[in-house]
Image: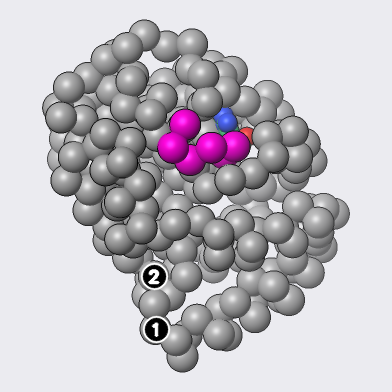
Amino acid sequence: MQDARYVKEAFAGIARRYVLTNHVLSLGTDVLWRRKTARLVESFAPGHVLDLATGSGDLALAIQGACPSARVLGADFSVPMMRQAQRQGFQNVVAADAMALPLADASFDVVTVAFGLRNMASWPGALKEMLRVLRPGGRLVVLDFSLPSWLLLRGPYVFYLKHIMPRVAGVLTGKREAYEYLCGSIERFPSGARMEALMRDCGFAEPVSRPLSFGIATLYTAGKP
Ligand SMILES: C[S@@+](CC[C@H](N)C(=O)[O-])C[C@H]1O[C@@H](n2cnc3c(N)ncnc32)[C@H](O)[C@@H]1O
């Protein structure tokens, strides 16, 4: 869980270079993760999709491409990040805090959140808001970073997160400090079975987690009973 004011300021500072920095730091893998997420959303044949913490709109655009007849709404509390979404061609955005969404109960078939839940002030609070705006039978899809379970990979990956990634990101964005918190935030964020348990505690049914790229990211789905 994170301090909302710090998170807002951090994303305002990196908004212009956010997309490029993602692609460089992940060697383009982030694009594949979002494509996979969009294909999963497509399999639910949704009419209305909410992409929370939409930021630069990369996932919203991938979902709109995979589900051309769906109405996709992006919500974020960072106006500079949403301007990036609009520059990238995703216009249907609303300024909103995920902790108190200005959206009606049961109004979406699918709620997605990519690399956003980890940054929110309360994970249970945010998940309960997502549950509220989902219709019964609707699906939650969460994509976020995690640590590889394979210990031989975990050590070098944590070293990369702590020592290499902030330097590279600092050169690209001029805001090294915004990336220095990333490793700790990933270490603190519940993943795998712990995230499934949290989703169940918040009222979701049948949570499932799928590790991606050796567990560097994880894709979660759960349903609203
Ligand atoms: C790492 S970016 C992810 C952007 C995009 N989903 C992606 O896949 O690249 C995280 C986003 O979460 C947003 N965010 C964090 N906490 C939020 C909250 N409480 N309400 C709305 N947006 C939030 C930030 O403003 C930022 O744009």
Number of numbered tags placed on the structure image: 2
Q: Say what amino acid the circle numbered 1 marks.
A: Trp
Q: Say what amino acid the circle numbered 2 marks.
A: Gly
Mark 2 / mark 1, whichever is N-terminal: 1
In the image, residue 121 lies in the stretch drawn in magenta? yes
Q: Residue at x 29, y 52 (%)?
A: 196
| Image quarter hosting the N terminus | top right
Checking the image for residue 215, the label placed there is 2
Tell me the SS state at disc 1.
Answer: loop
Q: Which residues are magenta?
A: 120-125
In the image, residue 84 lies in the stretch drawn in magenta? no
Residue labelled with disc 1 = 150
- In the depicted structure, whether residue 33 falls above or below residue 109: below
Q: Is residue 150 left or right of residue 119?
A: left
Q: Disc 2 versus disc 1: distance between alpha carbons?
A: 8 Å
Q: Where on the picture, by quarter, is residue 124?
A: top left
Residue farthest along the bottom direction in this orientation: 152
Q: Residue at x 30, y 61 (%)?
A: 193
Tell me the SS state at disc 2.
Answer: helix
Q: Is residue 83 left or right of residue 220?
A: right
| Residue 159 in sight here | yes
Image coords of residue 77 (percent x, y): 62, 25
